[in-house]
Image (cartoon, helix red, strand yellow):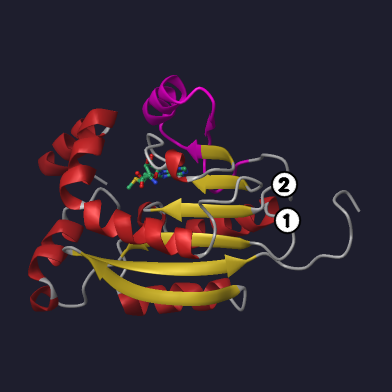
């Protein structure tokens, strides 16, 4: 598909971590604060004993939230390079969220902020399955993502901002409900909200209780 001039310029600019960071600071601060509160209320950020996986971590700006051991993965070499330079005590890997291979069943908790509106439904389902296979039994994957207001007039500024997003799969609430039906009963919580101008979804997917040990 041919990229519009707008998309070309936007994508080229956002490839630079500092441009990405600046747009996030201007537009996303209220929503990001809300995500941090939710994770803190679930005990994800403060627990030093947790081994945390961050899927689609970008330039790693939120890695400082987590007191536990932290691994961030992202497809962007530029973002991961910068994150590794800035935070050498944390682990960052270039990897695709739909195919990555780390140690199976080794993480206590997984989080993802703003990744899945870049992935189609098929890729999202595949990625969630991969993440669950990397979680220990009965552990939670906390997902935060962009939501497109159903109609322009419901939230005009939020609607326009989401339409300008790099992600090609910014979903409405209804599209999210359909997607999560595909993920199935492992989705244990779903919540829609708004932070500043931006609508978001928060959902939690729980890994299964598997009795056999890894390798069996
Ligand atoms: C909106 S950014 C969010 C980054 C970070 N979580 C944050 O909130 O600052 C989306 C990120 O998803 C990454 N991404 C897109 N497709 C991906 C894929 N298939 N696998 C891993 N990361 C991907 C992009 O490189 C980008 O860093």
In the image, is 8 to the left or to the right of 170? left
Drawn side of residue 59 relative to residue 107, left or right? left
- Report if the CB atoms under discs 2 and 1 are less than 8 Å apart: yes
Q: Residue at x 61, y 45 (%)?
A: 48
State the residue at coordinates (81%, 65%). Answer: 210
Residue 152 picture quarter: bottom left
Determine the secondary structure under disc 1.
loop
Disc with the residue nearer the chain's start (2 vs 1): 2
In the rendered image, residue 95 lying in the magenta stretch gets the answer yes
Ligand 1 shows up in the quarter that is top left
**Residue segment shown in magenta:** 73-100
Answer whether residue 168 is visible to the viewer in this image. Answer: no
Point out residue 203 in the picture as x, y percentages from the top left corner.
47, 69
Q: Secondary structure at mark 2?
A: loop
Between residues 49 and 76, which one lies in front from this camera angle? 49
Single out the residue that lies furthest toward the top: 85
- Where residue 200 appears, as percent x and y from the top left, is 31, 66
39 w.r.t. 155: above or below:
above
Work out how far the residue at label 2 is from the one at label 1, CA to CA, in angstroms.
6 Å
What residue is rendered at 60% in x and 63% in y?
140
Q: From what the image shows, is residue 148 above or below residue 29?
A: below
- Whole-percent x, y for residue 185 in the image: 61, 78
| Residue at image mark 2 | 106
Crowding at label 2, few (<14), some or many (≥20) Cα neighbours within 10 Å? some
Can you say whether 78 is above or below 141 in the image? above
Q: Which mark is residue 136?
A: 1
The quadrant in which residue 194 appears is bottom left
Membership of 191 in magenta stretch: no
- Does residue 14 appear in the picture of this structure? yes
Q: Give the left or right position of residue 165, taking residue 155 as reference.
A: right
């Amino acid at each position: 598909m041919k990229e519009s001039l707008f998309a070309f310029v936007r994508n080229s600019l956002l490839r630079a971590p500092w441009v990405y960071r600046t747009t996030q600071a201007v537009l996303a601060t209220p929503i990001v604060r809300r995500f941090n509160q939710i994770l803190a209320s679930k005990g994800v950020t403060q627990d030093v004993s947790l081994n945390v996986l961050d899927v689609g971590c970008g330039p790693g700006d939120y890695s400082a939230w987590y007191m536990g051991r932290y691994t961030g993965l992202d497809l962007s070499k530029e973002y991961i390079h910068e994150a590794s330079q800035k935070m050498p005590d944390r682990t960052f890997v270039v990897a695709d969220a739909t195919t990555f291979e780390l140690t199976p069943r080794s993480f206590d908790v997984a989080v993802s902020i703003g990744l899945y509106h870049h992935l189609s439904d098929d890729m999202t389902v595949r990625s969630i399955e991969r993440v669950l296979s990397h979680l220990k039994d009965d552990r939670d994957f906390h997902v935060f993502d962009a939501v497109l207001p159903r109609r322009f007039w419901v939230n005009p500024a939020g609607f326009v901002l989401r339409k300008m997003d790099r992600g090609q799969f910014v979903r409405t609430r209804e599209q999210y409900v359909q997607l999560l039906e595909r993920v199935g009963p492992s989705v244990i919580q779903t919540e829609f909200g708004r932070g500043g101008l931006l609508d978001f979804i928060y959902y939690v997917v729980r890994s299964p209780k598997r009795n056999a040990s890894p390798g069996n």
